Amino acid sequence: MQVVEYLVIFTILFAVVAFVSAPVRRALVARGADHADDSTLADLEAARDAKYRELRDADLDHRTGKLSDADYEELDQTLRGEAIAIMHDIDRATIERQ
Amino acid sequence: MALIGRALLIMALGTAVCGIGASIYGARTGMREWVDAGRRSVYALAALATIAFAILEDAFWRNDFSFNVVANHSSTTTPAFYKLAAAWSSQEGSLLLWVFLLSLWSSLILFLVRKRAREITPYATTVLLGFAAFFTSLAAFWANPFTTSANPPAEGLGLDPLLLHPTMMIHPPMLYSGYTLLTIPFAFAVGALITGRLGAEWIALTRRFALAAWLFLGIGILLGALWSYTELGWGGYWAWDPVENAALMPWLCITAFIHSVMIQEKRGMLKVWNVSLVLAAGTLSILGTFLVRSGILDSIHAFGASTLGVPFVILLAVMVLGSIGLIVWRRDQLRSDARLESLLSREAVFLLQNLVLVGMVFVIFWVTFFPLISEALTGTKVSVGPPAFTPFIVPLALILVALSGIGPIIAWRRVTVANLRRSFALPVTAGLVTFFVLLFWPGGPSSRPFALIMFALGGFVLTSVAQELWRGVAARRATTHEVVPLATVRLVRRNRRRYGGYTVHAGLAILLVGVAASSSFQHSSDVILKPGQSAHVDGYAIRYVRPTESLSSQKIAFGAVLDVTKGGKHVTTVTTVRNFYPSQNPSDGLIGKFFDTSQADSQVGLDQNLSRNIWTVINVDPTPLAPLINKGNNVFAAYAPQVMTKAAKLPPDQAQAAMNGLWAERDLAVSEIARRFVTHPWPTEFLLIVDPLVIWIWLGALIMGIGGLIALWPVPSFARRRVQVASPARPAAPPPPVPVREPV
């Protein structure tokens, strides 16, 4: 019975080592991993999504009467300007990445 | 199988350590393959922990008493339903559960972000594997669930009777899911601090996990309260017990984070605050586990009091000092991008709400740990108890409820007084009407000012949420002309975070109204009754109709049928039971072990409706049976050794028959003695409580959970949702794809 248990343990151990080390072994065979830094882009995309949410929230706040027309117009313009700025930053980051 | 289990734990620990090394090496060199190997270590760890946990559950299921943990926490008579839960009633099993859940949630987040956050993720993986290595090493070297005995007992000690409750199947995994989920935002916050990538990305990646932690922890806390109310026999649902508090503190912290993170997402503000909240919540989640498992503070929950204190204290010290160090190191990058534009804005309300929540955490932490603090300073452990919380928590809770009504009806950035008036008119009116109606209501809550204010605030919050929903629906219908139900569903579906949050606010108001009512207007009576006698509580006459008794292989149940009337009219009939489980204490004797009061639990007799609960519990004192029990003990103390000596000389099958005969005679004696509770009933103690609006606590919590699920439900990303209005060729197309006006 213990032999079977040891057999199971070594099989699992082999499977774990093979699974975990696979990326490193593959890389040794064929190098050329993608080391590109996409964090800036990801940050900007997250900021863009948040800005979109903010625009939609402002729209909903206006339509539900929490923002006056004048406040909404001003806020909407500000937010759209900020969104455009983020989009330009994303464009720049995309070009730099390419 | 125990050998495989032990090997799996060692392998899991090795995998975690290798994964930490691979992740750090990958992060330092920028070599993706090593980062991938680190991520795969988490997947492998999850597989190993799953198999190990399955082996342990299988041992409980098969009554394999060669496993010490099974022998100590289960028995052949433990109901199958509870055998699976028995695993986490033990120190060893709960540590393995921690590793199992942590590895599952870690695998999920790392799978979801496998192609994103490439700088932060390796460090986050390192932190998650660090937690896994810590708990795996505890399970492998301090409290191994796979230790075995060469001479296993024929019968186990059984599960702690207090844990024989349906909520206990789910309560610990929910709490542990909450705790382990909190380590994910913690790990990514650490990763963001180490790499200096403190933008919006790490928050976007982990926000949903923070929300899931909030939800799971909330469910765990609620189930604990339900267990306390229906099992512990004291009539309450919250006792400010250290372990309850340990779960509440991270929940409050993460509640604050879920709100304040919106300010960072929208305005780039409160970066230090948010990262501090996440780090504090993660640390408090470890503190919660530590309190349950160390037994450092006296608690009904400290089932696993042990010597695990030192490793936990070291881990907590590393977390606290490391967090402070990282924040100080990155203080320049954590400066806000913007300033608060107006005190009349949702940001300002969120900020105030955050201060209230953190204030609550501080109060709870201080009072909970006061015994330890006093012992450290004066050498005497001073327990201050539940009354010390009330003067601080009640006013803070009132402010919190008020803010949960103000938040939904105030806009981001700034509002004009005219809009403010328009938004507040109806909710404030509703609150004032509630206040004055209840103030002058005959027999109303005017004598309890805090409760009265809470009811008024409840009216304010519910009206503000209803008004917000209605205005949203009206705005949608103005452009779509949909019918109201369809417009409501689509409005909520398109704005899940907003309306999920509002639903939570409504649920919180309902829950706290239930708490205020039930704690302020509870009527209770501790009485001793004989069959036929009655007691009066809050206008209800509760009559002890007759005693009941039942005997099974698991327990003796002494109960009572109680008839409740009001004004001569029958209201309900309830049955309450006190269960006595066989003790394993040899000094109780062969008969007395079945009547040990330390091995008893309660089954409350409960009748609940929307307006009040009638809660009853019997507390049977078996002292009148003592002469018979002692006599039985003496008889069997003399008789049993004779039978056992004879049986030892017989062939196994005859020996077994002889022993079975002995046990049958013992069971007959126990049955006859227990029967006297019905044939010769003696005056018995009852706790009788009439409590208003308790059910609203559970309903409020349910509504909060539904709100949490709405907010948690995945929505398509804006980038994908906007594809129809956005130009795909952005560099060449100047018009930016910002949202167009469309139905809300």
Image (cartoon, coloured by chain):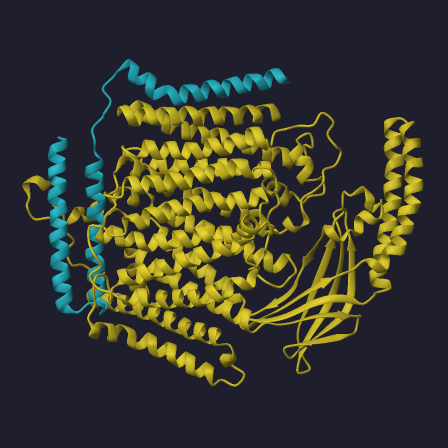
- Return the residue nearer the eye: B376 or B245: B376
- On screen, residue B301 above or below B414: above
Q: Is residue A52 visible?
A: yes
Q: Residue furthest front?
A: B378
Residue B362 in picture, x, y percent from top left: 44, 55
Residue B139 in picture, x, y percent from top left: 55, 32
Could you tell whether B674 is left or right of B339 in the image? right
Q: Quadrant of the C terminus of chain B?
A: bottom left
Could you tell whether B447 is left or right of B564 in the image? left
Residue at (44, 22) in percent of width and height: A16
Residue B709 in picture, x, y percent from top left: 39, 53
Residue at (48, 33) in percent of width and height: B134
Residue B708 in picture, x, y percent from top left: 39, 55
**Based on the displayed image, in which of its 4 quarters is residue B408 positioned?**
bottom left
Residue at (22, 36) in percent of width and height: A39
Chain letter, colour cyan in render: A
Residue at (38, 20) in percent of width and height: A21
How many numbered discs sit on the rendered protein?
0
Q: Is residue B36 visible?
A: no
Chain B shown in which color? yellow
Q: Quadrant of the N terminus of chain B?
A: top right
Could you tell whether A34 is left or right of B505 in the image? left
- Return the residue nearer the eye: B1 or B305: B305
